[in-house]
Amino acid sequence: MSGSGRLAPDTVETRARRLNRFGFAFGPRFFVLIGVGLLALGPALFEPRLAYAVGVWDAIVIVAWLVDLYCLPGADCFTVRRTWTVPVALAVPSRVQLTIINMSRVTVRASVVDHVPSELRSEPPTAVVDIPARAQATSEYEIRPEKRGEATLGDVYLRYRTALRIAERWAVARLPQTVITYPNLTEAKREALSLTRSRQPDMERRAQRLHGSGRAFESLRDHRDGDELRDVCWTASARRGKLIARQYEIERSQSVWILIDTGRLMRTRVADTTKLDRAVNATLTLSQVAMTSGDRVGVVAYGRKIHHLLPADRGSLHLRRIIQDLAVVRGEASEADHLGAASWILGNQKRRSLIVWITDVPDTATTPEVIRAAAQLMQRHLVLVVIISQPDLVTTAVTRPRTAQEMYQSAAAQEVIHRRDVLLARLRGQGALALEADSRISPALANAYLAVKQRNQL
């Protein structure tokens, strides 16, 4: 992260140097001029004196190459700068700037290649720029990250020539840089703002308290038809000679724990991203919504063991820590230890909290471990189990089969969906909240949280 506190990577720059021991070569026009001289070899078979002319011509071309090479500035006359304008986010196109500063007295044309890993771009970016003397030139290229986490960029390579283009020099700028690809920050921010504005307009727009069905006392007001008897303040009613009711607001400073399963089932791809990527984006959105509502958010990402743990807290600094940790959450090839994650919550979170468990259930006839683990948490906490559905499975189940193979596939898909419905119904029957979300998991999860707050289920 940059020193200014932005999530965008730092700007880096360095002085270029020769690519290898010699660092020069023949330019494209050198070969063109040599080819022109070779055209005279044919007539030289009939007129031997023309062979001397070919030799003289080649000597002139070589001298021109030496003069052009001498005029080319050395590699140390160039400084290369790589600039990032926005944070690097998953599946979000962004621009990177390469600036070449020419400190010599010669205008050159340079071919630039930046060593960018395949996680950020499928092919290395290339550009051709004209760099005036004592000036600089900038080129841009686009990246579109395909996975979260760290990616290392390498060196920037230059091939530059004068206007003659007879000779060229090679240079390299050592610019190794590790950048972090974050979850989709723009989508999370947009979803969070949209949801908080639609569900909590007073809190978002006018910075007023949101009156709801919570039990945190806010003020007194005149009794209205429909108010519950338990809300009547009898002492205030006796003093004023009329019924006075207590007005409440939704409780704040409650704890919301988000458990992210990173086991093998979460590596399944849904459309163009994995279930784990969708879970990470939903976690970021829910964190922003919960903090806007005044609650504290904790995050646990676990596989066979707990890999990332952030205690429940709130504030912009805590949100930044969440973003940084979510960026490096990785899936595992093995099953996750759900009972171990539940044991950690029970051992460290004594006060009743909302546990948002983003996971997946295997296609098995037995009760999955995650269901048994959630049942343990229900004794003390309110548990919301979130399962990411697979649209292709639903499509297969509802498509009318035309062949025997399609019939078997449809029957298998229907059985998987039925088992999931039974598991979710069992969870709801035990007192948990259960949600099966499609690709729009972020708003669905945030809406479920806001509904919990509105109904005072904590």
Image (cartoon, grey):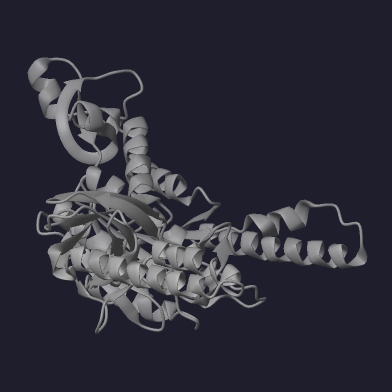
Q: Position of residue 354 (x, y in %)?
A: 33, 57
Visible in this render: residue 274?
yes
- All told, the count of numbered labels is 0
On screen, residue 66 versus residue 340, left or right, reads: left
* Closer to us: 336 or 316: 316
On screen, residue 88 versus residue 124, left or right, reads: left
Q: Position of residue 106 (x, y in %)?
A: 17, 55
Q: Position of residue 198 (x, y in %)?
A: 36, 31
Q: Position of residue 319 (x, y in %)?
A: 22, 55
Visible in this render: residue 251?
no
* Residue shown at 68% from the left, 61% from the top: 417
* Closer to us: 228 or 78: 78
Is 242 located above or below residue 389 in the figure? above
Q: Residue furthest left?
A: 239
Q: Residue furthest top?
A: 241
Quadrant of the frame with the N terminus: bottom left
Res 168 → quadrant = bottom left
Is 27 located above or below residue 208 in the figure? below
* Closer to us: 324 or 283: 324
